[in-house]
Image: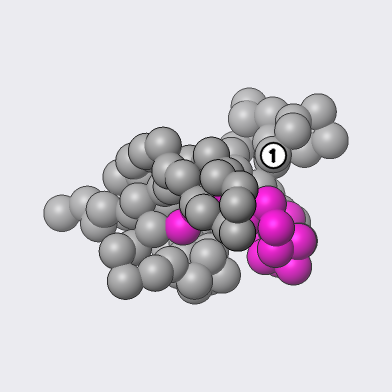
Amino acid sequence: MKQKILLYPNEQKLIREKLINLLELDEHNSITLYELENHPTKTKQIMELLPEIRKFCSMSKITAFSTPEKVDRPWLSIIRHMTKQDYEMVSADWRIKQENNIIRTKRYYFHKRL
C-alpha cells in the first residue's frame, strides 16, 4: 500500500490552506494563543477538520489526531503538525494590555518555507 503523502498530495495541500485561512493571520503572519483560546469558533472549525485529516494524512501516532480528548489543546497540535511542511512556526512571549491588566501569552509567527 502506498503512503498517503504519495496518494493524496493535493488533498493535503488543500487542508493546509484551509487551516491557514481559518487562522486569519495578521499582517505579520502571526496569531496569539490568547486569540485562539478566546475564539471557540476557530478552534471548533480546526477540530472539524480532523475527519478529513485522518482520511488524507498519516498522523495516527500523534495523540492530538488519534485521541484529541487526551490533549489540552489538540487544535494547537493540529496547527503545528499540519503546517510544518509549508511553514516554520516560531513562538515568542507576548503581552497584551487590556484596561489595567497585562495578559501574558504566546505569539506564533508563520514563516513560509522556501
Numbered range of the magenta stretch: 31-48
Residue drawn at (61%, 48%) of the image: 101
- Is 42 magenta? The answer is yes
Residue drawn at (58%, 57%) of the image: 98
Colour mapping used in the image: one colour
In this view, 113 is above or below 72: below
Left or right of residue 10, residue 58 in this image: right
Report x, y in % for residue 103: 57, 44
Q: Of helix, strand and loop, which mostly describes the magenta segment?
A: helix
* Quadrant showing the N terminus: top right
Left or right of residue 62, residue 21 in this image: left
Q: Nearer the viewer, residue 8 or 87?
A: 87
- Is 63 magenta? The answer is no
Name the kind of residue labelled 1 in the image: Arg
* Quadrant showing the C terminus: bottom left
Residue drawn at (43%, 43%) of the image: 94
Residue drawn at (39%, 58%) of the image: 30
**Quick check: can you spot residue 73?**
yes
In this view, 83 is above or below 26: above
Report x, y in % for residue 28: 29, 64
Which secondary structure, mark 1?
loop
Per the image, the residue denoted by label 1 is 73
Classed neighbour count for the residue bearing mark 1: other residues with Cα under 10 Å, few (<14), some (14–19), many (≥20): few
Residue, far right = 69
